[in-house]
Amino acid sequence: MAKGKGGYPGGMSGNMGNLMKQAQKMQRQMEEATKELEDKEITAAAGGGAVEVTVSGKKEIVKVKLSEEVVDPDDIEMLEDLIMAAANEALRQMEELSQESMSKITGGLGGLGGGFPF
């Protein structure tokens, strides 16, 4: 039984080269998508729009907007809860956008290795 040039039966070394090229292409696409996401911003509101929080693609809070009527010195706890709710929703939406973007590139592999035939 003769071996192919690469020492693997059936020309396996050529398939491995193609697989490496595909992985490198996917890595470049993921890097480009990550850069694009970093430039995006998402705003979420709580309390019927009384509190708005904007987060960046880097998952950092970049803006907090409060309506005057929500600022009640006798009810600081409600304001804290509204800020937390708006911030968490904005971060959740940014994470969802990030997952969708990466899923388009990986084809839903669920991480490297899950869909490769070896």
Image (tube, rainbow, N blue to C red):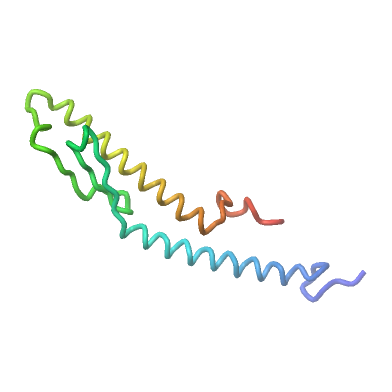
* Residue sitting farthest toward the top: 74
82 vs 25, left or right, is left
Q: Going 78% across and 71% down the picture, which residue do you hit?
A: 11
* Residue sitting farthest toward the right: 1
Q: Going 92% across and 69% down the picture, which residue do you hit?
A: 1
57 vs 65, left or right, is right
Q: Which is more toward the observer, 63 or 10? A: 63
- Residue 100 in picture, x, y percent from top left: 46, 51
Q: Which is more toward the observer, 87 or 19? A: 87
- Residue 21 in picture, x, y percent from top left: 60, 70
Q: Which is more toward the observer, 14 or 41? A: 41
- Residue 80 in picture, x, y percent from top left: 19, 31
Looking at the rendering, which quadrant does residue 47 occupy?
top left
Tell me how many marks there are.
0
Q: Quadrant of the C terminus?
A: bottom right
* Residue sitting farthest toward the front: 48
Q: Going 56% across and 55% down the picture, which residue do you hit?
A: 107
Question: Height in image: 54 above or below 105?
Answer: above
